[in-house]
């Protein structure tokens, strides 16, 4: 395999020239160099330099202090695009979760603290030379993910690297080098020391950015990470797991929460809730994901319109499309492969989704607040305000879901009379 020719965008060359002219060695490094070598879009270009933050802020007119104590300054190019420039660093102290870093004078020190050989390749944008002391280019060509230095020590320095290894190997379709793999498996027990946020962000990055997340997630499972971090998912049978991953792959990148819901679909509600709470997503994301993952199947063409309205009322009309996409992905992943009776024809999911949309376009009442009658009307009818009200309104909604024409004030008032009579009239005020 021959690697594509590297070249950096003009702004990277400009930043490099400005720093080098002032006497500070500067290299492009990390993800962009790796991605371009793989023939992929570069993503963010990061630079590493011997200049200290105060030097950078002196040399560039427009800078943003992104993490000056860690050596990182954002430099704004003329078009407003920001580039992260970081002083060469080395690790002074690590405990698996945090690192104490010191500034270094040599780029080799900086490359030596990076996690994997493919992430430790530097490119000099002016001299147009590679600096690759750990053989990252060879590993890229061979399709291998390997730690820089001894894997056990490198994972002990920062447990997050275990998760990053799965992410990079999955994303780029690399084989994990055996010693690196064994050290990963041996480190799984330490992952619980990582913060929920870092664990979550790794999962979200896989779901958000990877066109084929099943590979990285498959490594989560085979390494034992899944059992340590997501036991609810680890308990699945091999068949259920394969089907679930296949369906996740069918959803597009850029929709991490939709893919997460897909991954959780089929778990019991308690497991879903537990896992989401542990991930510490926002309340909105937690609720949305749980609702999507736990939604009952869309009513099929043979059910009544009332069933469709009831489904929309339970699940929420704004979730219709998301749930339909989940069902469609699940149906496609099983259709034609799965002899079992509950395999669903994808065409029937599309039909069910269209039908639900058509019913939705009639703007039926789906919530209590859509009723043509409210608490004030109940008072006017002589009922005493109280917890009863909620129940009466919910009963009315059930009837309206069955028969949308009922949703007119006079007709609902007549319904209230029958509801209250059935209760023995206890809630009717005297006089
Ligand atoms: P992407 O942004 O696509 O996820 P990336 O390689 O740019 O990939 P970043 O997390 O942005 O990954 O980090 C940039 C670079 O910093 C990496 O390429 C790697 O060299 C280094 N790096 C980041 N995190 C770590 C870590 N935990 N341990 C060692 N090096 C790291
Ligand atoms: Mg990056």
Image: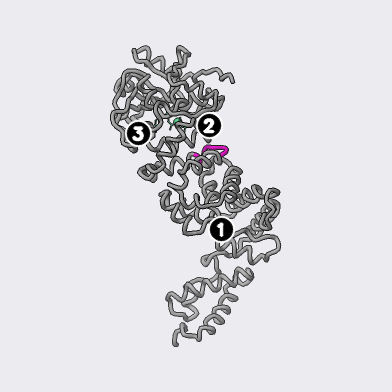
Residue at 48% of width from left, 18% of height from top? Answer: 10
Q: CA distance from mark 2 to mark 3?
A: 22 Å
Q: Residue furthest bottom?
A: 431
Rendering quadrant holding ligand 1 = top left
Q: Secondary structure at mark 1?
A: loop
Q: CA distance from mark 3 to mark 1?
A: 42 Å
Q: Which residue is mark 1?
A: 295
* Mark 2 or 3, nearer chain start: 3
Q: Do the residues bearing badges 1 and 2 touch, measured as CB atoms within 8 Å?
A: no
Q: Nearer the viewer, mark 3 or mark 1?
A: 3
* Mark 3 or 1, nearer chain start: 3
Q: Which residue is mark 3?
A: 157
Answer with left or right where residue 137 lies relative to residue 107. right
Q: Secondary structure at mark 3?
A: helix
Q: Is mark 3 within 8 Å of ligand 1?
A: yes
Is residue 207 visible to us here?
A: no
Answer with left or right where residue 340 lies relative to residue 191. right
Q: Which residue is mark 2?
A: 175
């Amino acid at each position: 395999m021959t690697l594509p020719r590297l070249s950096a965008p003009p702004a990277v060359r400009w930043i490099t020239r400005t720093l080098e002219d002032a006497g500070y060695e500067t290299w492009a490094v990390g993800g962009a160099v790796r991605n371009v070598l793989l023939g992929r879009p570069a993503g963010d270009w990061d630079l590493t330099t011997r200049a200290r933050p105060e030097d950078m802020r002196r040399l560039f007119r427009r800078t943003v202090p992104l993490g000056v104590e860690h050596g990182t300054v954002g430099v704004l190019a003329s078009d407003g695009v920001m580039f992260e420039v970081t002083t060469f660093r080395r690790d002074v102290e690590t405990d698996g979760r945090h690192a104490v870093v010191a500034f270094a004078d040599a780029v080799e020190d900086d490359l030596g603290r990076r996690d994997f050989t493919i992430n430790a390749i530097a490119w000099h944008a002016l001299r147009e030379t590679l600096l690759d002391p750990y053989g990252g280019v060879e590993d890229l060509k061979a399709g291998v993910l390997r730690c820089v230095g001894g894997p056990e020590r490198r994972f002990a320095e920062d447990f997050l690297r275990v998760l990053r290894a799965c992410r990079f190997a999955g994303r780029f379709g690399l084989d994990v080098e055996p010693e690196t793999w064994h050290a990963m498996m041996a480190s799984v027990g330490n992952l619980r020391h990582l913060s929920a946020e870092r664990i979550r962000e790794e999962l979200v990055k896989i779901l958000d950015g990877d066109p084929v997340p099943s590979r990285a997630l498959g490594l989560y499972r085979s390494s034992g990470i899944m059992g340590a971090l997501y036991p609810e998912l680890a308990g699945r049978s091999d068949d259920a797991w394969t089907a679930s991953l296949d369906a996740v792959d069918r959803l597009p990148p850029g929709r991490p929460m939709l893919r997460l819901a897909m991954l959780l679909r089929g778990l019991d509600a308690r497991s879903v809730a537990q896992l989401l709470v542990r991930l510490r997503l926002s309340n909105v994301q937690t609720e949305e994901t749980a609702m999507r993952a736990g939604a009952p199947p869309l009513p099929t063409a043979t059910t009544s319109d009332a069933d469709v309205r009831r489904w929309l009322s339970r699940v929420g009309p704004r979730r219709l499309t998301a749930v339909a996409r989940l069902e469609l992905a699940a149906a496609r992943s099983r259709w034609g492969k799965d002899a079992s009776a509950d395999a669903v024809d994808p065409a029937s999911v599309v039909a069910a989704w269209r039908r639900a949309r058509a019913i939705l376009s009639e703007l039926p009442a789906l919530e209590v607040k859509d009723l043509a009658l409210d608490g004030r009307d109940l008072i006017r009818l002589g009922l005493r305000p109280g917890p009863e009200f909620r129940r009466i309104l919910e009963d009315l909604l059930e009837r309206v879901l069955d028969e949308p024409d009922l949703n007119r004030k006079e007709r609902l008032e007549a319904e209230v009379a029958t509801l209250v009579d059935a209760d023995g009239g206890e809630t009717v005020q005297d006089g």
